[in-house]
Image (spheres, coloured by chain):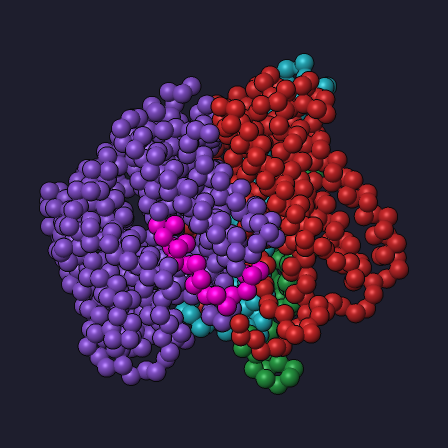
Chain colours: A red, B green, C cyan, D purple
Amino acid sequence: MIKKVLIFIFIGIIGFYLVDIFSQIPFGEKRDNVGDFYLEQSVQTLKVANSVTGIVVNFRGFDTLGEVTVLFLAALGLSSIMYRRKKQGEKEVRAKKPSSRILQVGAQIIFPMVVVLGAYVFIHGHLTPGGGFQGGAIIATASLLMLITYRKFKVNHNTVSWIESIAGVVFVSVGMVGLLKGMAFLENFLDVGELNSLLSGGIIGIIYVAVGFKVAAELTGVIDTVLLNNRPDNNNENN
Amino acid sequence: MTWLIIPIIILVILTIGSAIYAVVTKNLLYAVVSTGLISLGLSLFFFILQAPDVALTEAAIGVALTTIIFIITIRNTTQYEDEPKKEKNMKGELSND
Amino acid sequence: MDQLLTISFYGTAIALILIGLYAVLAKKNLLKIVIGLSIMDGGLHLLFVSIGYIKNGTAPIFSPEVLNTKVQMVDPVPQALVLTAIVIGFAVTAVALSLVIRLYRHHNTASIDEIKNLRW
Amino acid sequence: MVISPVHYIALPLMAAFLIPLFGKINKELVRIIPGLVLLYLSYVSVTLMTQVLNGPMIVEIIAGWNPPWGINLVFSPFSGFLVSMMTMLGFLIWVYTYNFKPEVDYSQTTKFYTLFMMLITGTIGIVLTGDIFNLFVFLEITAISSYALTAFYRERDGAEASFKYILIGSFASFFILLAIVILYTQVGTLNMADIAQKMPAVDPYIKGTILLLFFIGFGIEAEMFPLNGWAPDVYTQAPGPIAAIFSGMVVKAGIYALIRVIFTLFDVPAVLNLLLIMGLITMVIAEVIAMRQERIKRMLAYSSIGQMGLVLVAFSIGTREAIFAAIFLMFNHAVIKGLLFLSATYLVYNSKDKEIKELDGMGKLMPFTSFMFALGAIAIVGLPPFAGFWSKLYILIAAADAHMIAVMAIILVISVIEIVYYFRVVHRIYFRKATSNTDIKIPTYNAKFTLLVLGLIIVVIGVYPDLIMGIIDKAAADLLDKQNYIQSVLSLR
């Protein structure tokens, strides 16, 4: 009981401070900050219509590299944590009941559409809302749909890890080309093209497509790892 | 933004309501679905705040993927919050993993 | 009117943070704790996007329609940062959930009170 | 290609993405590549360090946008010194891990080495970056690899320790992100030099809140009391070499972030008093608890927390001598605690509970490892003529110069406590008869090499402290020279 009271006091203090601080920060007001520079430069120099993409991939591209790495490490850590050494003759067990016919037919129709949508989202990341992360997540949802509909659908880990590796290497290499040319890491070295055309933004397109593939592969890997372990575990195991 | 005031208020109620429900309910599956609803609410909030990129990300990652991973976890573990500890497993042996 | 909007955005965000905080601190179930963490994160993300909003601003996308008109755009920086934060939050949630599964396998329970090989 | 600080991040990332593919060519490559990367980074460190010591600090711009718009890496004497320490120690620990547990199968080995390398990269990133949000991203890279590595062994309670760490670590990142949110509304920039420049104009109340949030967030990573509940369990449950990395690098990166924020970003001198009090409390409580520990790694973990408290105390005195002593102690602690963890890991290699009483008589069974442990124990309590002596001496001198007699007295009392509990272990190793019949594991040759090198560093620095004192002196001067930092970064405009 005392613990509950303490918790409420703690939450009260934090809440009071939060309200107090944010009552001094007006909502909806224009502030003087670096955002203006980004808005200006993303049109003038980078020729990127979606300036959020411009920030994510170019101005603060290093963050994105780190972010992709976080996801990569999460996928890796997840499979390390969930790892179980396979016993002799043990097969991967999934639920035996097949899913309903409606789901199967529906999945067949929806799957390609969702994949195309995802690809569209990350290819047009510099023109419309969206980009590598969103597109990759959408594609991962599509593979999730296949995983839960078809019990026999298997994610080919080899392919996934190839896609993941190559996409990651493309991202870093594109950055390194800048270094090799005597410019900064991740600096744009391509022609930026016309604003609001598909081939604009220089390296932004390449990086976002790579990020899209990588995120899709990583998230698919995460879901597959968790799903594969979806079985009762009554074995003694010491490894 | 004036005409948005009523949808915004509905959204506020929806989001905070599902947050409270997610914390209060004993059934973890309901809690997870409410968490998905919070993400949906947040995604609409982001849209209203003129952040379509964030809205899309929150919709794809928060609503879909997080919820799915939570549900898989629940299927692997337990559905009720106060479920007592199962001492022995089906084979009658203590699992020591 | 403005007051109401302020309250609804900042207020929702702070409310979510506090509700999540309560779940993390008071709940005994591992899954509830992870849910609390993700609610807290959600509130923080909303707070972050809210501070970048500018009244009557448009989304920071220079589509052909707005290109040559002088419109006020909202601050794109918080949006870009929140994008990163959401993905990181997802990664942490996924790792935490995998730990919950492993702990459940090991101890056959998801309650903190029962899992006490190490002192909490 | 010209050597530049960005190699520290780009090459390990490239290697991490490529490791699965290399594994298809030859499975041994999975273990070798991280070592090669760390070896190359050590070479980069030496090159850059000689440059920095004889010239201005290196500011590396990323994506071609000058600060404050782009992200930049700052290789100053202070950050450079820590990074060099981390890469070299990382390489030595890699040598040690090679063939550490050969029975772990291929799939797990791949993950272990990738996470191992990324853990080091994350800490290097925290130290190098000049952008506050980028620091947050690197903190998360470090954190996620730590979570996964803590739970690496299935037969231990790693999952529990890791979950605890995730809980507390999420609070840390929550507070840091919240601080960044408020900070951004006030100064409108994320570049650390630009923040430092604009900070005086911020309302003091809000400034205090932001600082407090950063203090809590980085305090968790720096094992400050009472936010260090995760540390002992994580150190105990993680694989031995990883515990050495935690105490040698992860905590150091947390302290670096805390110190950088307090000294460079903010102009609030009052926070040093808070830091002093927190440091003293951390030190006293941790050392007292360490005395009561039954398990060797837990004892080392609490000792590590105590030493971090001492580092914070030294930083909080705030004079140049004190900061010099603090950086010296950070270096010594990384090396000595690394040696202690690495040797203790082999001393209790096959034991299940890893208790201190199982060490009875190890001096005869494992003479080399025991000797190295004893060397580390003598060095860390600060007995001459080893490295730990000098750092403790300089802290005491700095405290005396600042007229902090009470602090001096507490440090001396704490040293006595340290002597008691370390010598209890050494006594058991050398003067008790072996009772337990656990089968011992003789270290592999590469592990012996690492222990030997670390031991030699301790002895050499103990005898010739001048070898390293010049560099540390420049590092301390760099940390205090805030204007130089701001100008070096912002002059690129």
Expressed as whole percent of the image width and height from the top left, the position of residue C6 reads 56, 35
Side of C67 relative to D317 (left or right): right
Quarter holding the C terminus of chain D is top left
- How many numbered discs? 0
Q: Which residue is drawn at 77% across and 43% down?
A: A115
Side of A24 relative to B23 (left or right): left
Expressed as whole percent of the image width and height from the top left, the position of residue A113 reads 82, 43
Q: Residue at x 73, y 19 (%)?
A: C65
Up/down of C100 relative to D357, above or below = above
Q: Residue at x 27, y 67 (%)?
A: D368
Up/down of D297 relative to A219, above or below = below
The answer to whether residue C34 of the structure is visible from this angle is no
Up/down of D425 relative to D375, above or below = below
Magenta stretch prevailing secondary structure: helix
Name the residue nearer the viewer: B83 or D110: D110
Q: Is residue D102 magenta?
A: yes
Expressed as whole percent of the image width and height from the top left, the position of residue A134 reads 67, 40
Name the residue nearer the viewer: D148 or D116: D116
Q: Is residue D93 magenta?
A: yes
Q: Going by the picture, which residue comes out furthest to the bottom?
A: B92
Name the residue nearer the viewer: D105 or D203: D105
Q: Residue at x 33, y 70 (%)?
A: D347
Numbered range of the magenta stretch:
D89-108
Expressed as whole percent of the image width and height from the top left, the position of residue A231 reads 68, 70
The answer to whether residue A117 of the structure is visible from this angle is yes
